[in-house]
Structure formats: structure tokens, C-alpha cells
Image (tube, rainbow, N blue to C red):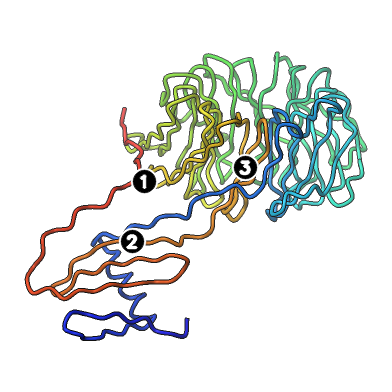
Amino acid sequence: MGTEPDTKATGSRRVRFSLMTLILLVVFLSGGTGLWMSWAPWSIVWEKSASIMFLSRCVRFSPDGTQVLTPIDDGIDDGKTGVWCARSGREILCLSGHSYPVSEAEFFPDGRKIVTASGDGTARIWDALTGDQLAVLRGHKGTVEFAIPSPSGKTIVTGGQDGTARLWESEGQSPGQIISRDRLEVFSASYSPNGDQIATAGSDRTVRVWNISDQRETCLRGHEGMVFSVAFSPDGEQVASGGVDGTVRVWSLKSGRCVVGRNPHESVVTSVSFAKDGHTVLSASNDGTARIWRIQDYSDCLVLDCQSVVSSASFSADSKRVVTVSSDRIIRIWDAISGKMIAALRKEDSDIRDVAVSPDGLRIASTGAAVRIWHRRRPEYWWGIAWLPEFWIVLLSGGGLLLIGIRNLRKRPRSPSPLPTPPQGKKRGV
């Protein structure tokens, strides 16, 4: 950093550039003269092979991004959950107590506890530091599909194949309260940002919203098939839902009415979520696409073509990236603004059931027949070509070291050929 790079120009003239000059040059050139940025390739930091991990259904990062949580099925002793060091892959804890495989596991928001759901009809709460079992939540009749802590960590919502959703205190000292019933199955649930409401999606074609303070339930009707996914907007005033009928609906919680109903997909909608701005929705479908669209202006819809069934799509923490998982065993990373595909991560021998993005966005955990941690370093390769009245300027970098080659030209050169660009999402209107 203390040295100043210099290069020779035609006629043995030497041109010296300070670091500030380079920064100003980059800023100047990036204003439309053709600079491109490439991200360093993603690589696998560590993995646990199929001999240890077998068709694990979920994976989660701890709130600080240092640990990874995933169920373990070694074919011998089901019902365990592993906590791993995100950097080294070292096993930190093994949570053992369920008598059937674990269907889902989640960290509490403060990272101090873990909750697991299982086919044995129970959910269990664990100390994330010691691995001690703190409570067993009994009441469901059949597999518990999910167990989700509230934003405050004071309550937990569970749901499963018995058609009920239940609300529990996180201390596990009181029986779970049934907040939704009379369904064949409850597929998913979501807490509002302030933790005061819970939305559930189920087999009866409805979205149900439970208000914890007054214990009232609002039933939102409009879907023509089972509802698989539900999500609150960041301000907690709206809920998005999607399911078998291929529609995505946005509901106002004040009026209880559907304010936006879209048919962005040609098949089942597998997941829905909001961006941080609260005005943009991400939906994924069996039709082979994920789509990013604004609630009030669908004409600017971005189509992310995955070419196979998309089981899930999620925004990064800053909503600048989208990560998709599809049946072709590829994890794709997209720019959420342009729709360009940034990277495609693939391991030929492995199905992918779930992915999670670390809080800093630099790691991705994937699970299925194996659990893997993918990592990328921060941007380190830049390239571009620009023409100024007297110079061709080629700007390159690698490993954080900038190199500039400058050549004096006596006459205006021909326009340079454009560099190839990565695949881009298509914009499609109604």
C-alpha cells in the first residue's frame, strides 16, 4: 500500500500513479465507459460425505455465522442434530434425544438455544453452548414439520401432519396452545417482525393469521389449492402467500383482503418472500423459474431461469442477491437488481435439499446427501477497457494488486470489442 505503481509509456516516458489517482480513475471509468467486476470463484471449504450425512432436509447458520446446524441421519442412530464450526467443519455438538429423524432445526435469534422438530411427534429445546436438552414439547399427533422461535425468543410455533399449529413458551413449562386446527396438514408458518402475529399456510387453501395478544384468528381465503408458503412484509402490515394454484397473493392485515393477486408462474409456487424494501416479492416455482417483481408494477418482473423445478429461493440479508435451489442439483446466485446470474455452484454427486446464506453473505451452506460449506472471498478481479483522447487504458487486478497498462496513441483507435457478459435474467410483463 505504501508503494506507488508505475508503468512505462511509449517514448520512454514514465507515468506515476498514486493510490488516490487509481481510485479516482476507477470511479471515472465506471461511469459508463466499460468496467466489469468479477467475483472470485466459490469453493468448497469442507463437506461431510453421504456416509455421515444422508438426505438432511435443512441447514441453518447461527446468528453470528460461526456455526452450522443440520440434522444427522447416519443410517444407524436417527434423530440427531449436529452443530459444526462453519470454518473448519469440526463437530461442536451432537444433540441426541429424538427417536425419529429430525425434520427441522433452528437457532434462536440470540444464538443461545436451538429448537428441533421430529417425526417422533415432539419438538425439543437445547442449550446451544452445552448441548443439554432443556425441554420436550409434546402434543402433536404425528410428525412435527417445523418449529420456529419468535423474534424475541420467548415463544415457539410448531406445526405438522396432524393439521394443527401450536404456540409454546420457550421455557417449555406449559402445554402448547392450539392456534390453528381443522386442516389435513400445516406446511409452513411465519412470525411478524414484532412477534405479535403468526401466519400459517395449510392444506385447506387458506392462510390463517393468529394475533397472540387477543388470541384471535383471521382466515384469508382466495387460493384455489393448498398453500405451501407464507411470509410477512418487513413492516408487518402485509402477508404474501403461494401454493398449488400458481398464484402469489399479497394480503392486507388491516382489511383482511387480498390487495394483489398475481399469476407469475405456470405451476406450483414453492416459496415466497419479501425484500427489505417491503415492495418487492420473490417467488419460486415448479415451472423452472424464480421471479422478482414489485407489488404495484409487475411489468418490471425479472425472470431467473433455472431450467428445472425451483424448490426454494431466498434473498440475502441485504436483499442484493438471490439464492435459488433447483432439481438439477445447482445452487445459483443472482443479482437481485439486474437479474444476472453471478455464480452456479454444483457438485455432481449430490442432491440439494436446502441452503442457507451466512449473515455476511460470504458463505453458503448446502445440505442433502452431504453438507457443504461454500465460500467466496470479497471481489478481487476487475477488468475493463476504456478509450480516452490520448490513451488506451486497460485496468486489471488480481489478489488486490492493481496493474495498469497505458499506451500512447497518435490517432483515435477503433472501438474495442465488448467483453462477454454473464447470463442475464429476462424482464417480462403481463
The percent position of residue 192, horizontal first and vertical second, equals 64, 41
Farthest residue to the front: give it. 12
**Label 1 sits on residue:** 338
Q: Amino acid at mark 3?
A: Ala
Q: Quadrant of residue 290?
A: top left
The percent position of residue 269, horizontal first and vertical second, equals 51, 24
- Determine if residue 213 is in view: no
User: Mark 3 or mark 2, which has the lower sequence index?
Assistant: 3
Alpha carbon separation for disc pair 3 and 2:
30 Å
Q: Secondary structure at mark 2?
A: strand
Q: Residue at x 36, y 34 (%)?
A: 298
Alpha carbon separation for disc pair 2 and 1:
19 Å
Q: Which mark is residue 383?
A: 2
The percent position of residue 166, horizontal first and vertical second, equals 79, 28
Would residue 298 appear left or right of 250 to someone viewing this image? Answer: left
Q: Residue at x 56, y 46 (%)?
A: 235
Q: Secondary structure at mark 1?
A: loop
Give the mark count: 3
Q: Which mark is residue 356?
A: 3
